[in-house]
Amino acid sequence: MPTGVQNRQIVLKSYPAGMPTGANFAMIESPVPEPGDHEVLTRALWLSLDPYMRGRMSDRKSYAPSVPLEDVMVARTVSRVVLSRDSRFVPGDIVVAPGGWQDYAALPAASLRKLDPALAPVSTALGVLGMPGMTAYVGLLDIGRPRASDTVVVSAASGAVGSVVGQIARLKGCRVVGVAGGAAKCRYVVDELGFDTCVDHRAAGLGDALALACPNGIDVYFENVDGIVQQAVWPLLNDFARVPVCGLIAQYNDAEPRPGPSLASVLTKRLTVRGFIVSDYGDRWDEFFRDMSAWVSEGRIKYREDVVEGLEHAPEAFIGLLQGRNFGKLLVRVARE
Amino acid sequence: MPTGVQNRQIVLKSYPAGMPTGANFAMIESPVPEPGDHEVLTRALWLSLDPYMRGRMSDRKSYAPSVPLEDVMVARTVSRVVLSRDSRFVPGDIVVAPGGWQDYAALPAASLRKLDPALAPVSTALGVLGMPGMTAYVGLLDIGRPRASDTVVVSAASGAVGSVVGQIARLKGCRVVGVAGGAAKCRYVVDELGFDTCVDHRAAGLGDALALACPNGIDVYFENVDGIVQQAVWPLLNDFARVPVCGLIAQYNDAEPRPGPSLASVLTKRLTVRGFIVSDYGDRWDEFFRDMSAWVSEGRIKYREDVVEGLEHAPEAFIGLLQGRNFGKLLVRVARE
């Protein structure tokens, strides 16, 4: 480590009320940390920005602890090992790490997973071959349980999770209908990803458009958003439909949780509405990774990355994500590989 | 059939707005019907009154068709065969039948199930050994999936379904907390049925009382009622809790379905909220009947019947059911066995 190098860190200054703003974050500089025994000093190359981070910027109870004020924002990164005090890693290794919004982190070796850069671009370890891809895989297959010729509706269809959900559903023989914001995303979902059709939730008449797109009703609704999309989907659900609840980005900035769909619909249609969090499915990792690696290398699953240059732009990129301004998996390039 | 015998029938005169009244029903007299080929003329002995019937008195779409105006109200009955035009039945046989709110019905033989009066009182075929018992069995075991030492909360705990749910959960080693209306029902649930405790939803402080009764949170909530009980339960649900949605009696008289609990709770707690209807579980009948017959004959599952005398009292008894005035499985004795 050259002397004089500082560690740039983005810390949480305040819990936002509603949509976060730049003022909720601050960039500070600190000394580069020293790794202890069985720790590794890592340098972030790619930083993953994901909607779940909004939940950490809150004192509202959720499934994971809040980020304390003045702490570095949490994130997964793809990082390079700079210095290792553990026999499993050597400088130059590329790893997936809980690196946070910062240049350098000293991390327990046990928290790192080594990547093989020959296998796939390493950034995919934050997307299609990482947490978002696995979220799509277990949520669709384990909870959605699609059968061939089912109609599967996917919200946030061009996003990191939704894009994979829809493509897996196509591989399983389903009719796949995306819901995305804007004509460009809808075109991409159909033309590039091979969904059967896609409905623009920003256009007027969402309910009618979705009904037209789903002439046989909806058997699986992969819920990423809540809000008007959920409301348009609900009347179209078939008896015995499954609703994996993966994300609710439309309500993440609300002060109070919104009421949900009526239990009367759950009863009369015998719906299964089930929340899940990918970290509960560690035992499915090997199967996911084997399947998804094959699908990606065969070109059967495609992905798109939306790359923002520079750690200092992470806050505005994250705010854009909550507003649907990203197009594909949102990544910050923190340093060149 | 002696000449001059008429068939008393209770027909639906109008769809109620809100709580039904006597004016929604009328008793008429018609000729006793003639059974056709492979039909059986049956005489009702016991008529089952159940909350689901409120859903049939509505043009609101549900899982089953509405009762048309001027038609006889639907119901299961325990009936005696009077005349048979099918080789499987002879006069005197006791059967479970879709007999409706009337003295006589001519029914397809295939719709009847013969009872053995030596096995158990025949009225139990409408309760613990019939649809309500089976509802409890599949809802708790297949959807609730209780594990030993789970806390199971049962609403409408003294009712035909809830009483069986709680007793099965006790057999499976769970801590069982009932919710019922009034001190007498609560005492019965604990003293007679062996629930660990019971909370009175008519008393003040339901949320606090339930929290005290569930020091380890709630792993299974068997939903029969919705309303204030659901609202008190929800904050106490543990991660990965299961909510079989069986009935929603508190909202059956509403003009519009009520909003449900937030999808945010479903996501962050990874809840499984699942509606079910017993008629979808025909393939579980044999197992249910074997288990429940044994439990009842061994005295491990108890039941209580609330018997109303005379078909003419069915409407007011049904209205009382919607108000929680019954105490145990509500039956109308239409004729002596």
Image (cartoon, coloured by chain):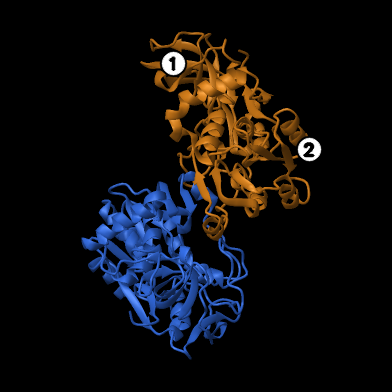
Chain colours: A blue, B orange
Q: Chain of mark 2?
A: B
B29 is higher (above) or lower (below) than B23: above
Left/right placement of residue A319 relative to residue A309 reads: right
Does residue B289 show up? Answer: yes
Q: Which residue is mark 2?
A: B183
Q: Residue B8, percent across and down?
A: 56, 23
Left/right placement of residue A196 relative to residue B296 reads: left
Looking at the image, which residue is at 71% across and 36% down? B196
Q: Residue B241, percent across and down?
A: 56, 48
State the SS at label 1. strand
Kind of residue at badge 1: Val
**Residue B40, labelled with which disc?**
1
Looking at the image, which residue is at 33% across and 62% down? A164
Q: Identify the residue at the far left of this view.
A: A298
- In depth, the one of B61 and A156 nearer the eye is A156
Looking at the image, which residue is at 44% across and 21% down? B107
Q: Chain of mark 1?
A: B
Q: Tell me the CA gap for discs 1 and 2.
A: 45 Å
Crowding near the residue tagged with mark 1, few <14, some 14–19, many ≥20 C-alpha atoms within 10 Å? many
Which mark is first along the chain, 2 or 1? 1
Left/right placement of residue A276 relative to residue B226 reads: left
A112 is higher (above) or lower (below) than B336: below
**Residue A88, labelled with which disc?**
none
A23 is higher (above) or lower (below) than B267: below
Q: Residue B316, percent across and down?
A: 67, 33
